[in-house]
Image (spheres, grey):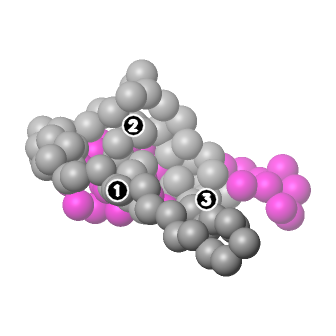
Amino acid sequence: MPLLFLMRLKHTPLPVRVVQPEEIRNVSVLVATGLIEAEIAALKPTDPYAASRIATVIRITEEGLAEIAKMGDVPKLVKTSMLFARGLRLM
């Protein structure tokens, strides 16, 4: 989820490098929507299974900070549970 990744970035000292493919996709989406500034570069693979890209997140834009502020107004998820026969509980 790109917006959850954006929330994580808020609590991370920037600039930060990202190498996980899923996180690079999040960075790509956030850059495309103007919520962050980042550089995404290709790497020379050292073997056939090496990661081929790296991203460096430079900063969260004003629009990104506004989006984070909006997400702060979302009510927290309520923890629910269901009680089954014989006292088993699903959480």
Mark whose residue sits in front, 2 or 3: 2
The numbered dot on residue 9 is 2
Asked if disc 1 and disc 2 are in contact, CB closer than 8 Å, the reply is no
Residue drawn at x 67%, y 77% as measured from the top left: 85
Specify whether residue 90 is painted magenta: no
Residue drawn at x 39%, y 37% as measured from the top left: 9
Residue at mark 1 to residue at mark 3: CA–CA distance: 28 Å
Answer whether residue 28 is visible to the viewer in this image.
no
Q: Residue furthest right?
A: 47
SS of the residue under disc 3? helix
Answer whether residue 9 is visible to the viewer in this image.
yes
Q: Residue furthest front?
A: 86
Specify whether residue 39 is painted magenta: yes
Q: Quadrant of the C terminus?
A: bottom right
Residue at mark 1 to residue at mark 2: CA–CA distance: 21 Å
Residue 2 located left or right of residue 64: right
Residue 28 located left or right of residue 54: left
Residue 20: x %, y % from top left: 63, 51
Residue type highlighted by circle 3: Pro
Q: Residue furthest top?
A: 13
Residue 37: x %, y % from top left: 29, 43
Asked if disc 2 and disc 3 are in contact, CB closer than 8 Å, the reply is no
Location of residue 85 with respect to 3 vertically, above or below: below
Mark whose residue sits in front, 1 or 2: 1
Location of residue 64 with respect to 79 vertically, above or below: above
Residue drawn at x 67%, y 57% as measured from the top left: 52
SS of the residue under disc 1? loop
The numbered dot on residue 77 is 1
Residue type highlighted by circle 1: Leu
Q: Quadrant of the N terminus?
A: bottom left
The mark nearer the N terminus, 1 or 2, is 2
Q: Report the front residue among 74 and 57.
A: 74
